[in-house]
Amino acid sequence: MKIILITPAAKLAKNGNRTTAIRWARILRELGHQVRVDVKWDGRPADMMVAIHAWRSAQSALQFRECYPKRPLIVLLAGTDIYRFQKSHPEKTYQCMEVADGLACLHELVHRSIPAEFAWKLHVVHQSAPPLTMPRKPSIRHFDICVVGHLREEKDPLRTALAVRNMPRGSKIRVIHLGKAHSADWADKAKKEMVRNPRYHWLGEVPGWRVRREFAKTQLMVLSSIAEGGANVISEAVAADVPIIASKIDGVTGLLGESYDGYYPVEDTHALRALLVRAEVDPTFLGKLGQQCAAKHSLFTLERERAEWRVLLDAVL
């Protein structure tokens, strides 16, 4: 089939939507299809459309459905679709969900957050990530904590920095934050935090190889988001054997499971600080987090993602 894959993320973007689009295009080509990736449908004929993001790609999806009422249309529900736009822009978001033949999602608990009338269309596609090509050698001089995420409201990006402001004397904790500031205000906040907080280091947007290098030397990763559609960085950390501490939200528990030991309540700085201190001083606890993450390896392999795409294609075809 000729497939048009629509993503709102521009060609050179380094965000999750673009990463997902590139990987899915490769998988669909491996399954024997011709795939073209664009930010907006230009009307050229296609046998099927895959639209990443219900609200942001709604115009393309709705135009495709109008032109081709019987051709398959798959829409990925991004985190902002699930937790923001179905509330702030319900008409267009729900219209896109309604015309789709299948709704892709990235974790097991999305059904809790969308109207029941659309839940039957859901298909979970776990995002894959490759293992590290270098051995992991966590720093001895520092207890490095990696934060990988752009600076915007949904990410609660400075929570980890706030949590390490008043560490016990003798703590070696250092926070390395990789991610682009989505506004000048967020950049200013990060810079001011570095001046106030010597444990916090914001490096800005970096290429993927730099993230993997950080994974090779970090002790653990923190994901502090208020909402997530299924963060690819969870897949990347698990594949890299990096233990995770995360806010307890559906987008994380839908991947790591309800019984994972590394959760803290959303926006709870004190609870996060306690977990970080425990991880530094209690090797058994840190090791258990690593073991629990390792048990999830099979969720995030390329083979599984490819198999889940086969199931989704069979369903809509």
Image (spheres, helix red, strand yellow):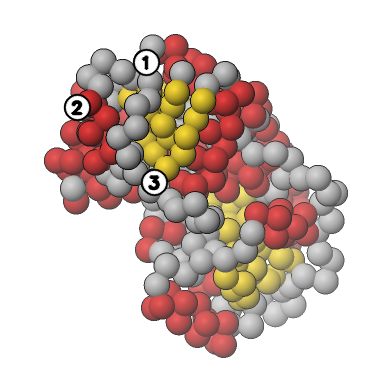
Q: Which residue lies furthest to the bottom in this view?
A: 195
Res 79 visible: no
Report which residue position mark 3 lands on: 39
Hey, which quadrant is residue 59 in on the image? top left
Report which residue position mark 1 lands on: 316
Q: Which quadrant, please, contains the C terminus?
A: top left
Residue 9 in the image: above or below residue 280: above
Look at 64% across and 69% down and name the residue there.
175
Res 19 visible: yes
Mark 2 element type: helix
Residue nearer the viewer, 163 or 224: 224
Task: Give x and y (percent) for residue 271.
Answer: 50, 61
Give the left or right position of residue 143, taking residue 68 as reference.
right
Task: Give x and y (percent) for residue 188.
Answer: 45, 82
Label 1: how many Cα within 10 Å (few below 14, some 14–19, many 20+):
some
Hey, which quadrant is residue 179 in on the image? bottom right
The circle drawn on residue 66 is 2
Residue nearer the viewer, 271 or 180: 180
